[in-house]
């Protein structure tokens, strides 16, 4: 089954922003269906990653009782054909917004973003040309990454 997973704000659904799925039939997507309470709450759920084998879903959520900051990553594993209650991934979440999870196809690595305070390693704005010069100069390239 081909589906599209996305977050939507629908007045008739469970929370302020739910993760919904739209099934593709005859070349057209059907109306969005909110995922179950195993995923969606009264708060905000967004940035879903669905395992290609459909065995789990990783997503971000905000406004829950166990939220560690400004939004956390959660995991729901499929059991008996349905998603289990989600688990807060407290061992990797920060006090900032953790979002946009992605797992590599071999399921060895998880990538995600953290919205945190960031101090630029540059003292002035950089152009693409400036960055290209630094990246092509091995003696300077390391400064970009360690600040």
Image (cartoon, helix red, strand yellow):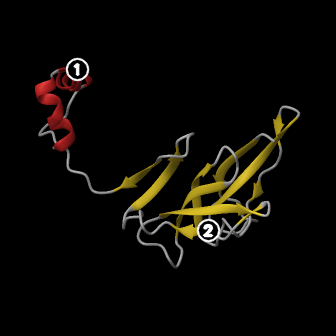
Q: Which residue is mark 2?
A: 86
Residue 95 percent coordinates (x, y): 36, 67
Q: N-terminal of the two: label 2 or label 1?
A: 2
Depth check: give the residue in front, 110 or 128. Answer: 110
Q: Nearer the viewer, mark 2 or mark 1?
A: 2
Check disc 1 and report the residue beneath it.
Answer: 129
Left or right? Give the position of 93 relative to 10. left
At x 45%, y 69%, the residue is 90
State the image coordinates of residue 76 (x, y, percent, origin top left).
63, 63
- Residue placed at 84% from the left, 31% from the top? 27
Quarter of the image where the N terminus is located: top right
User: Residue at 19% of width from left, 36% of height from top?
Assistant: 144
Mark 2 burial class by Cα count in 10 Å: few <14, some 14-19, many 20+:
some
Which image quarter: residue 130? top left
Instruction: Judge whether 119 appears above or below 144 on screen.
Output: below
Decide: few, some or many residues near mark 1? Use Cα within 10 Å; few <14, some 14-19, many ≥20: few
Cα separation between marks 2 and 1: 45 Å
In the figure, 146 relative to 98: above or below? above
In front of the other: 113 or 55: 55
Quarter of the image for residue 64 reads bottom right
């Amino acid at each position: 089954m081909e589906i599209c997973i996305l977050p939507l704000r629908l007045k008739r659904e469970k929370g302020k922003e739910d993760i919904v799925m739209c099934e593709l039939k005859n070349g057209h997507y059907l109306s969005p269906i909110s995922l179950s309470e195993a995923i969606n709450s009264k708060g905000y759920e967004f940035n879903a990653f669905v395992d290609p084998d459909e065995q789990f879903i990783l997503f971000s959520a905000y406004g829950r009782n166990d939220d560690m900051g400004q939004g956390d990553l959660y995991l729901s594993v499929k059991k008996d054909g349905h998603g289990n209650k989600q688990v807060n991934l407290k061992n990797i979440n920060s006090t900032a917004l953790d979002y946009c999870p992605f797992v590599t196809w071999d399921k060895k690595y998880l990538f995600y973003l953290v919205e945190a305070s960031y101090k630029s390693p540059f003292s002035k704005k950089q152009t693409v040309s400036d960055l290209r010069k630094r990246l092509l100069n091995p003696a300077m390239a390391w400064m970009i990454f360690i600040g």
